[in-house]
Structures are given as C-alpha cells and as structure tokens.
C-alpha cells in the first residue's frame, strides 16, 4: 500500500497492478486502497499511473458512488490509454443486464386449420 505513494512512477504502477489483481480476487482486501486509486486517477502526473489506477479501480469492484465520478472524469483525460482504462473500468462496474424471461424467443407455432 505504501508503494502507491512512492516517488517512483514505476513503483506506483506496479502497486496499482498488484492491488488491482488482489481486488479482483477479493474486493475487501483492497478497500483501503480505493481512495488512493481515485486520487491517482485524478491527480497523478504520469499517464501510466493514472491508467493503472483506473484499471485497479475496475478490478477491485469499489462502491460505484465513489468510483464512477472519478472514472467518468478520467474519460476526458488527455491520454488515450487512460480514457480506455477508465471506459473499461466503468464497463466492469456496470450492473449486469437483466435477463429475459425463460420464455422461448422463437415464435410460437401456429395451429393450421383446414378450411
């Protein structure tokens, strides 16, 4: 966790990746890192760090009320890689689509009657 605040951008990127992978396994393991991820997405000078933080947010399944605004703002980032990572993270955090009822999607057979 302390590596997220390292002076080295490579250390911050690696920390985001590692914590993102942990978050994908169990979000509760990284819940304390979520505010730091959000801060990195918003304010870090290095685009690679912002991208890694956005990806980690998407993997760690945070509370949408805190993550979605930061990721939405990241869609306007000057770096294309950050914008793609933010869009991917938003897609992961979107609620699953409703499933259709179990009714058949094929048209019902019509009974032919003789005339």
Image (spheres, rainbow, N blue to C red):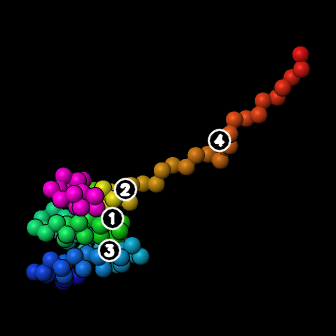
Q: Do the residues labelled 1 and 4 touch (CB within 8 Å)?
A: no
Reply above or below: 21 against 63.
below
Extreme residue in the top direction: 115
The residue that appears at 17% across and 56% down in the rendered structure is 77
> What's the distance in space between the residues labelled 1 and 4, CA to CA?
33 Å
> What's the distance in space between the residues labelled 1 and 2, CA to CA?
8 Å
Going from the N terminus, do you reach mark 2 or mark 3 first? 3
Span colored in magenta: 72-86
Q: How crowded is mark 3: few (under 14 residues within 10 Å), some or many (20 or more)?
A: many
Going from the N terminus, do you reach mark 1 or mark 2 first? 1
Reply above or below: 94 against 24.
above
The residue that appears at 30% across and 56% down in the rendered structure is 87
Instruction: Kindly identify which numbered label has been placed on residue 30.
Output: none
Percent position of residue 70, x then y: 22, 58
Going from the N terminus, do you reach mark 1 or mark 3 first? 3
> What's the distance in space between the residues labelled 2 and 3, CA to CA?
16 Å
Tell whether 10 sits left or right of 100: left
Overall secondary structure of the magenta stretch? Answer: helix
Reply above or below: 51 against 105.
below
> What's the distance in space between the residues labelled 1 and 3, CA to CA?
8 Å
**Which secondary structure, mark 2?**
helix
- Residue hosting label 2: 91
- Residue hosting label 4: 105
Percent position of residue 69, x then y: 23, 55
Q: Does the magenta stretch include residue 79?
A: yes
Quadrant of residue 94 within the rendered picture: bottom left
Q: Residues within 10 Å of mark 4 (few under 14, many from 20)?
A: few
- Residue hosting label 3: 20
Q: Do the residues labelled 1 and 3 touch (CB within 8 Å)?
A: yes
């Amino acid at each position: 966790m302390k590596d997220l605040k390292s002076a080295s951008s490579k250390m911050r990127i690696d920390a985001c990746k590692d914590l993102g992978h942990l978050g994908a396994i169990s979000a509760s393991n990284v819940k304390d890192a979520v505010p730091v991820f959000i801060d990195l997405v918003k304010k870090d000078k290095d685009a690679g760090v912002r991208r890694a933080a956005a990806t980690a947010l998407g993997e760690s399944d945070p509370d949408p009320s805190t993550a979605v605004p930061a990721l939405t703002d990241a869609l306007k980032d000057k770096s294309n890689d950050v914008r793609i990572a933010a869009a991917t993270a938003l897609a992961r955090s979107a609620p699953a689509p409703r499933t259709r009822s179990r009714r058949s999607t094929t048209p019902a057979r019509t009974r032919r009657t003789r005339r």
